[in-house]
Image (cartoon, coloured by chain):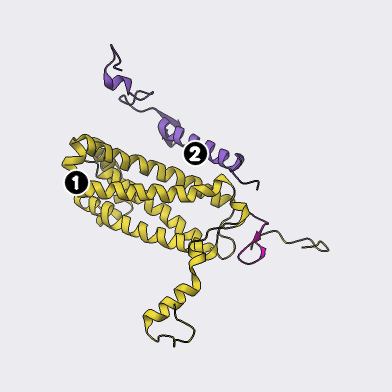
Chain colours: A yellow, B purple
């Protein structure tokens, strides 16, 4: 940050830094207190999803480093392979409950539409990443899934550039392109959550603005707000 | 302690035999495996519990 007596830098790096610090000061980026309405288990599922994603990425990284001869044959390899699968299962499990919770509390209220949209796109990207993961298992299951999926994808014209029978292409989608996009979207989603704050329950005051949430029911005529 | 008369793999086997063919339920054009249906049911149960169970320290 620039000291009060120091002239502001005119370079683009200084401008970006000033905007970033103004939008997300450290106490907002890493808060140590949360609104009282967050004392509910339903608010835990976002961070459970994120924790599962960390395990998914870490185990996937180990699998990429050691290679298929390791994960198909050795005990340690099979164990890490199973960790990768089951952390994905938990990731999708927690993400769906997170999605239900946010849907029923209309979490797009209070200028949070982009937070909701990035979450939805994260969900869709995760389905694609899981799908390509099933395609690169190198077993009869992956052959069956690829054989079935090609007909559906060809029927809508996607097969021309997304060939589920091409193992190399599916592996690259699974370990490079989709995790990269999912990582970026997740980081964006979390920064938006920090920027706009956690959505309050319907009708409760938003601590960020000190007013009832955007879609809270308006008081009836003559009724005190 | 070794379990006598029972192979190690059997002692650690899943409570449901997963080596056979899968079980499916059908509603018209919708076909769903029982395994996926169980997972969806567990998700609904966990969702309801998350709404109903008190959060530790939440009453302060």
- Label 1: state its secondary structure: helix
Q: Which residue is mark 1?
A: A66
- Label 2: state its secondary structure: helix
On the picture, is A60 further left or further right than B26? left
Crowding around mark 2 (Cα neighbors within 10 Å: few <14, some 14 to 19, many 20+) is: some
Residue A89 makes an appearance in the image: yes
Q: Quadrant of residue A200?
A: bottom right
On the picture, is A95 further left or further right than A68? right
Residue A106 % position (x, y): 58, 55
Q: Is residue A203 magenta?
A: yes
Q: Residue at x 30, y 38 (%)?
A: A82
Crowding around mark 1 (Cα neighbors within 10 Å: few <14, some 14 to 19, many 20+) is: few
Q: Which residues are magenta?
A: A202-212
Q: Quadrant of residue A107?
A: bottom right
On the picture, is B18 further left or further right than A103? left
Q: Which residue is mark 2?
A: B43
> Are circles 2 and 1 on residues that touch, CB within 8 Å?
no
Q: Is residue A189 above or below residue B56?
A: below
Q: Residue furthest right?
A: A222
Residue A166 makes an appearance in the image: no
Residue A112 % position (x, y): 54, 63
Q: Is residue B29 above or below residue A202?
A: above
Residue A89 % position (x, y): 38, 41
Q: Chain of mark 2?
A: B
**Mark 2 or 1, which is nearer the eye?**
1
> Secondary structure of the magenta portion, mostly?
loop
């Amino acid at each position: 940050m620039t000291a009060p007596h120091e002239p502001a830098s005119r370079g683009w790096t200084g401008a970006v830094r000033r905007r970033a610090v103004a939008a997300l000061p450290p106490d907002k980026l890493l808060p140590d207190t949360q609104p009282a309405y967050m004392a509910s288990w339903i608010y835990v599922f976002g961070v459970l999803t994120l924790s599962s994603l960390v395990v998914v990425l870490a185990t996937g990284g180990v699998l990429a480093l050691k290679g298929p001869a390791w994960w198909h044959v050795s005990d340690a390899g099979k164990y890490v392979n199973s960790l990768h699968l089951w952390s994905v299962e938990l990731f999708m499990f927690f993400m769906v409950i997170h999605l239900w919770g946010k849907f029923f509390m209309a979490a797009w209220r209070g200028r949070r539409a982009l937070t909701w949209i990035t979450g939805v796109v994260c969900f869709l990207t995760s389905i694609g990443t899981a799908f390509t993961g099933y395609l690169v298992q190198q077993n009869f299951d992956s052959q069956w899934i690829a054989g079935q999926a090609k007909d559906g994808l060809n029927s809508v014209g996607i097969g021309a550039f997304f060939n589920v029978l091409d193992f190399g292409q599916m592996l690259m989608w699974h370990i490079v392109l989709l995790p990269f996009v999912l990582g970026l979207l997740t980081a964006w989603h979390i920064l938006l959550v920090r920027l706009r704050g956690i959505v309050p329950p319907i009708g409760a005051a938003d601590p960020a603005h000190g007013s009832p949430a955007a879609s809270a029911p308006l008081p009836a005529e003559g009724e005190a707000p | 302690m070794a379990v006598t008369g029972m192979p190690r793999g059997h002692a650690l086997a899943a409570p449901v035999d997963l080596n056979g063919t899968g079980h499916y339920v059908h509603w018209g054009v919708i076909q769903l495996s029982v395994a996926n249906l169980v997972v969806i049911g567990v998700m609904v149960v966990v969702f309801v519990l998350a709404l109903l169970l008190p959060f530790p320290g939440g009453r302060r």
